[in-house]
Amino acid sequence: MQVERWDVFEVSVNGPRDGNPFTEQNIRGTFEGKNETVTVNGFYDGDGVYKVRFMPSFEGEYTYKTTGSFPEAEASGAFTVTPAGEGNHGPVRVAYTYHFAYEDGTPYYSVGTTCYVWPHQAEEVRQKTLQELSKGYFNKMRFCVFPKHYIHNFKDPVTFPYEGTPVDSSGLTEENFSYDSDFSGNSWDFTRFNPEHFRRVEQAILELRDRGIEADLIVMHPYDRWGFSDMGRQADDLYWKYCIARFSAYRNLWWSLANEYDLMKAKTLADWEHYADLLCQLDPYNHLRSVHNCEPFYDFTRPWITHCSMQRQDLYRHVEYTEDYRIRYGKPVVWDEIAYEGNIDMGWGNISGQELTRRFWEASLRGGYAGHGETYIDPEDDILWWSHGGQLHGDSPARIKFLHQILTETPGLGLKRGPGAFDEVVGIPDSKVFTDCYEIHYYGFGRPSFRDFIKNDGASYQVDVIDTWDMTVTDAGVHSGKFRVQLPGKEYIAVRLRRV
């Protein structure tokens, strides 16, 4: 048997179906190679099948042994871990304090998007989503394990995470939507998972992996009419352990404890710290971990948090604070929600493509990373990308892809804010080695027709004029000393200087 480095090796055995296998049975496995020994919990996948999954971090020969509460759980064997294939760079890790890199050292520049419940949609919608993702606009996607109840989200998902019966929602509309509605008609057994629901999440993780996209998995959220946001500590623990056992072995996984944790009024700070403790204990691969806010930020200085997953707190200033939050928290700053390109009747979902693109550039040049969302109303089927996926309608995705290409040309692992005039944002490599050889000057909504530069270091610089909206890079020649760069006098222009 063979498996690629950082891919999933799975052991599957048959076992008891009687009673409640989710709570009455258990299985775990130990995987040993020359450089590591890892023990993980397995899970019940329904129909009498139990599985244990492992992600090897090294090449070479491995052995495994599984044990459990039933005789058939006893299994052993060997397998070979081969070199990683094309496009397989391993999990993403924090690098150089404020940035990211894959485990093989390849820099990773996050340009994310949000599609909260795309795995839970009909197959036609899912396929449209995958077609858009295949265009390479994004390399991270936020989405939920649980279904979502909110405006434009009244249809039941294709599957539910538990055995049981949901409340009748056939009369829900945008006009009568209220969180005060009586949803007491739900009937769930929180001790019996529906494996098919979790298989859909796994399928989504793999489909993203095959497109070079990180799966930023939101484990909990407040937008709920089914009772999943308030199941109680015992049910929560069972759910968390099941998710960790099923999903941890996927290399492109990130953990988001919650979307807008502060709106989940049934949870306390002690609950969130408890879930984080479970993650740290049971995920042997140390995947990236964070928790997302609506209003107050979580305390991102907590040692278990690997990066800041932020939503803006102010209508006007947000990504402009990126360098301040880098200093405050000492971790990568990821703006996962800075308002969405769209036209809905909500202030968080009706900015222009130009404005969202500007926010991406501002965040990037200040040393952080930004996330996309789209909320254009579709009058025919009410499918909005931000929640369901489907088809993209906006102007920003292509510009975000263009920005990502510019970022990949950065010397080192990422940018930080450098010195510049009051009317520009200057990004320079966040590295002592490359600081003086590369810089990008961004003018945002300013429209200068020229800009003067002074370089007294005796070096020559290749100058490029970047139109971040029209997505062009114009060679402005090689210059040294004092020189003037002619500009088109329009918005969203940047000038890049690279020492020859």
Image (cartoon, rainbow, N blue to C red):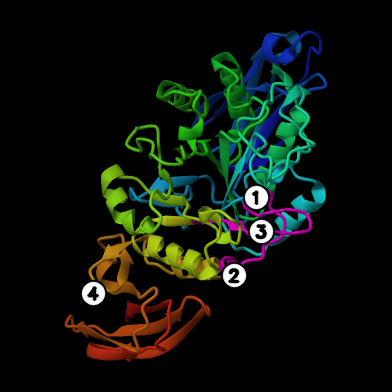
Tag 3: residue type? Leu
- The crowd level at tag 3 (other Cα within 10 Å; few <14, some 14-19, many 20+) is many
How far is disc 3 from disc 4 in space, using C-alphas? 38 Å
SS at circle 4: loop
Name the N-terminal-most of marks 4 and 1: 1
Q: Which residue is mark 4?
A: 421
Label 1 Cα neighbours within 10 Å, binned few <14 / some 14-19 / many ≥20: many
First-in-chain label (4 vs 2): 2
Amino acid carrying mark 4 in the image: Ala
Residue at image point 20% right, 84% down: 454
Residue beneath label 1, please? 208
Would residue 110 be seen by someone viewing this image from the given angle?
A: no
Asked if marks 3 and 1 touch (Cβ < 8 Å), the reply is yes
Between marks 3 and 1 in the image, the one whose residue lies nearer the viewer = 3
Where is residue 163 drawn, in percent x and y? 77, 22
Q: Which residue is mark 3?
A: 133
Q: Is residue 131 above or below residue 116?
A: below
Residue assigned mark 2: 395
Disc number lying in front (3 or 4): 4
Mark 4 or 1: in front is 4
For residue 211, say whether it is visible: yes
Residue 353 point in image, percent of width and height: 54, 68
